[in-house]
Amino acid sequence: MRSLVGFIRPTSGRIFLKDKDITDVPIEKRGIGIVFQNYALFPTMNVYENIAFGMRVKKYSKAEIDAQVREIARKVDLSDQQLAKKVSELSGGQQQRVAIARALVLKPSILALDEPLSNLDAKLRVQLRNELKDLQKKFGITTIYVTHDQEEALTLSDRIAVFNQGVLEQVGTPREIYNQSKTEFVCNFIGDINPIPPDVIRNSALRHFVDPEKKSYIRNEKVSLSPVPGQQRAVMLKGKIVDSEFYGIYTKYSLEVAGGGLLKTVETESGRGHYQVGDEVDIYIDANDILQY
């Protein structure tokens, strides 16, 4: 992202924006807005001055600055009273909206966000994640969002690029990244997943569908304790509940599979009873849901 914005010149390759090579274009002429992880707002300026800063640097007229600042403030739900406040008087969520307004007021072609929610508590993070998604739809602007939070990536994105040690492992829609992970790193990095012990495959009908010599994985929620309609290559295994974690709307069970190995499953709480540690259970796996590498 730093290369895209212009802070770093790439050691190889070129950067194109709307078919124009911008690799050597100065930062201020690229038309890319950026929101930093810590927002990087000016503490000595009020909210209005923070949003207006970029326009003043570009020598916009006073009237145009005022009109644009007030318009963008309305769009990100900042009141006239908040425009007059120091940024230190605002909540984390309001400061985030100021940083986004400051980037958007210059009408960039791309908005780049560098982990903008990482400094917030969990509840506020979820709330602002939804607000960000609404803002993105409202402005219709291409947004590049850097995050280490897999849930954030899945819920916010139209397309995800997964990097590992500087290598691009996979690019795809959230569903493709999650359900058809191309590499072992992606499959382990995105979401909760079970490695399937080779003996579980060798000692069950799964051996007819998947190669026991390859590394095999299955998403936790795709391991079921009851038959699932529509499963085309379902295999039933025998097992026992060895641990449970209650999360309110669902319970996560650890299962000891007959013949060796542990699997985890997620069961939605329906209020119709639940399993106890020590219960013998049937475990259903559809071979189509197994990822192999």
Image (cartoon, grey):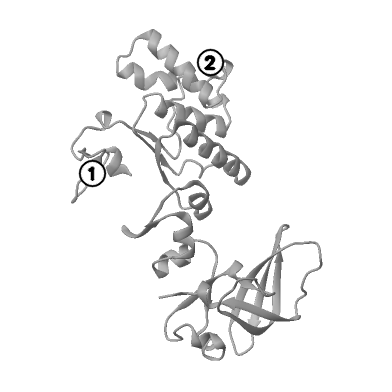
Instruction: Give 58 or 249, whichever is nearer the viewer.
Output: 249
Residue 46 visible somewhere in the drawing: no
Q: Residue at x 56, y 15 (%)?
A: 80
Rounded to the nearest angstrom, the CA distance separating label 2 from label 1 is 39 Å
Q: Residue at x 47, y 55 (%)?
A: 174
Which residue is label 1 attached to?
15
**Is residue 223 toward the left or the right of residue 181 in the image?**
right
**Is residue 50 toward the left or the right of residue 60 in the image?**
right
Residue type, label 1:
Ile
- For the N terminus, the quadrant is top left
Q: Is residue 188 above or below residue 34?
A: below
Q: Estimate the x, y position of residue 255 in percent, counting from the top left.
A: 65, 78
Q: Estimate the x, y position of residue 257 in percent, counting from the top left.
A: 63, 84
- For the C terminus, the quadrant is bottom left
**Is residue 67 toward the left or the right of residue 7 in the image?**
right
* Marked residue nearer the N-terminal end (2 or 1): 1
Secondary structure beneath disc 2?
Answer: loop
Q: Nearer the viewer, mark 2 or mark 1?
A: 1
Secondary structure beneath disc 1?
Answer: loop
Which residue is label 2 attached to?
84
Q: Quadrant of residue 37?
A: top left
The residue carrying pointer 2 sits among few (fewer than 14), some (14 to 19) or many (20 or more) residues within 10 Å by Cα, namely few
Q: Tell me whether circle 2 and circle 1 mark residues in contact (CB < 8 Å).
A: no
Q: Estimate the x, y position of residue 113 in percent, counting from the top left.
A: 42, 40
Q: Is residue 233 above or below residue 105?
A: below
**Mark drawn on residue 28:** none
Residue type, label 2:
Ala
Farthest right residue?
Answer: 272
The residue carrying pointer 1 sits among few (fewer than 14), some (14 to 19) or many (20 or more) residues within 10 Å by Cα, namely some
Q: Estimate the x, y position of residue 90 in percent, counting from the top left.
A: 57, 27
